[in-house]
Image: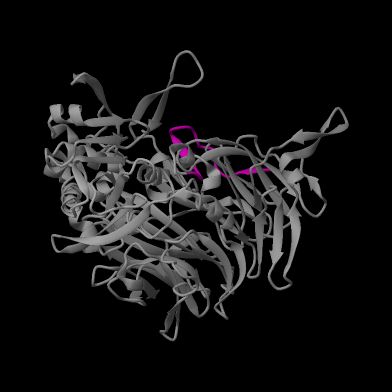
Amino acid sequence: MKTYGLLDVFNSSLKPASYNMRWISDYEYLHKETDDSVSLVNLKTNVSEVFLTKDMFVSRPGVIKTKIIQIERHAFDYKLSADRKYVAFISNYNKVWRHSFTASYSLYDRESGKNIPSSGIPDVVQYFAWAPAGSKLAYVWDNNVFLKTSPESLPKPITSNGGPNKILNGIPDWVYEEEMFSSNQGLWWSPGGKYLAYAEFNDTLVHNIEYPWYGEGQYPSTISIPYPKPGTPNPVVKLFVVDTDNTTIVTEVVVPDSYKSIEHYLATVTWVTDTRIAVQWLKRQQNQLILQIYDLNGTSWDPVEHLELTSPGWIGRFSPPEPVFAPDGNSYYLIMTDSTMYKHIHHVVRGKATPISPGYWEDIEILKVSEDSVYYSNNEKSRKPGGRNVYQWTKNLSYKCLTCTLQKECEYNTAYFSHNASYYRFSCHGPRIPQHFLVETSSFKKIKVLEDNKVFSDAIAAFQMPTMRQGTLKISKYNLWYQMYLPPGFDESKKYPLLIDVYAGPCSQKVDFRYRVGWSTFLASTEKVIVASFDGRGSGYQGDQLMFEIYKRLGTYEVEDQITAAKEFIKMGFIDKDRVAIWGWSYGGYVSSMVLGSNSGVFKCGMAVAPVSKWEYYVVLLRTAVITGHYKICIDLFVPDTIYTERYMMQPSENHDGYNVSSTIRCQSSHLLSHRLTINLAV
């Protein structure tokens, strides 16, 4: 049998297939076929029919000099209006940042079977969203928000003060997109489409960074963007609501009085009804939050209820989780830390929060709330933090696991529910080869195989594949998890090289039960290298006490624990202590740098990709040297920002010693030069 080679890592046919679907009712979903057509599947009638043909994505009718011709569209995706009458085909994708992109949107009338030639939407749009009801739509162009009350109507400008790198309306600026929203969305429709909320991001006071962009020209261009570094001015954000039936009525949703005079963030925006909206406001230190509910009173949004949260570290795992409201709009569910320092779902009624699923595990995500049930994922089963299962909690205080016994060898499971949770896509992600099924919630039975990955299973059977070993190490007062990719035919009496694959950032998790094939598979299968990962102090999904161990002291315990884990692996007897290395990307690159600079004597070499160098500001270090006849090049480039860095370290003026200790620059240069190759691939 052959081994899994380097070229196989980049072969898409040697990756497990997923199953795409979009629920559009409680019993209907859309599925994009392999030929790029879209099918509508009705589970009540058990009928599948063509909803959008392949040709609709390829071209559209156009008119040149009164002659009808086919104009190339080359759409890669689509958005369906809530009333199903219109489709927006998306083409000309151009990536901006991690989540943001520009694209073209061409509108198609499904009832007439015709395109809408003069929709008034510009060729390059920054964001597009249909209303949740009917066929109104909003989009962002040139940093301003525009509204169309119907696909055929003329666009109405809602804002006019937008400008690049100054004021952005309806889309977040860089730091909000990357660190707070994890999205390019900055506008939110009310459930009935009556109102549209949008955020205004004012970057006027934010300092810029500049970097060269090596494009197609002979000389690079210079990119300049507002980028708040720790301790420097942040964007000023305001939230407004416009009445889409009378766009002259625009009202600000005002921050709570206690936050007006202090620096704060807009964390989440959640519509409850057309006349009720919930907003989370977060202090700049990110250890205190107010969830404020507002009701419409005439043309103003009046505060009627609030919940205040505090934390000895930071709120949430990363940015604060969004509340999920009950159908009646009078209460909501929110994941927050309970008295045992574990994160669990709480039911909040009139500002009073009560946990619904306490225990020494963590609830991960609220998936669906119906009239009598809450569906959510957690890692309760077998107390394995790297596992995932989906549970149903009912108001009679009972709960059951919906995925624990559906399929053998499945310990990392997810679910995607229909509108009223009558059905769900059950996805088993591992440790076995992934499979996807359709399940009826009431009968708790699989009714359809969506993707069994037999094609992949047959293909991968021809390879010598590594096996996975998982276990725990006792460090400090914690039992902490590790995993190892072991080479085919692993023999404990032999000695193998070891590569530590590290991330180790706050609330990270490298050890889980997902099935993966990739670079680690290649190293173990072909190069006979053991690839290990370890979740030390500061990692997530095991309680706040463990996660907050590195609060205000990044670069300490999480670095020590990687060194300790490597020493423990060597003690197992099958590791060649003279061939131990470490590598990581981003925060993993930072930890790799700190580990190599510690002079532990454990690691013989390492690689740090896009690492942090100094948390206060970006530092470019270019070092070249000749070491035993070989050139070692070290280039560090990292740009920390306010939201990410201050979440864990506070501002430099508030944690001077912590910032000094956390810098890789304090490490011995000679050691870094001879043992580290650092590559910059990100800003």
The quadrant where residue 514 appears: bottom left
Left or right position of 655 against 440 = left
Instruction: Say which of 151 and 393 sits in front.
Output: 393
Up-down relation of residue 536 to residue 427 (above or below)? above
Q: Which residue shows up at 36% across the image and 33% down it?
A: 683
Q: Position of residue 102 (x, y in %)?
A: 56, 37
Q: Position of residue 574 (x, y in %)?
A: 22, 51
Left or right position of 575 against 128 = left
Q: Is residue 295 visible?
A: no
| The residue stretch that appears in magenta | 153-171
The quadrant where residue 481 appears: bottom left
Q: Is residue 658 visible?
A: yes
Left or right position of 443 against 681 = right
Q: Position of residue 612 (x, y in %)?
A: 26, 37
Q: Which residue shows up at 35% across the image and 30% down it?
A: 208
Residue at the top extreme of this rendering: 218
Q: How many marks?
A: 0
Q: Which residue shows up at 47% across the image and 72% down it?
A: 403
Q: Which is the main secondary structure of the residues drawn in magenta? A: loop
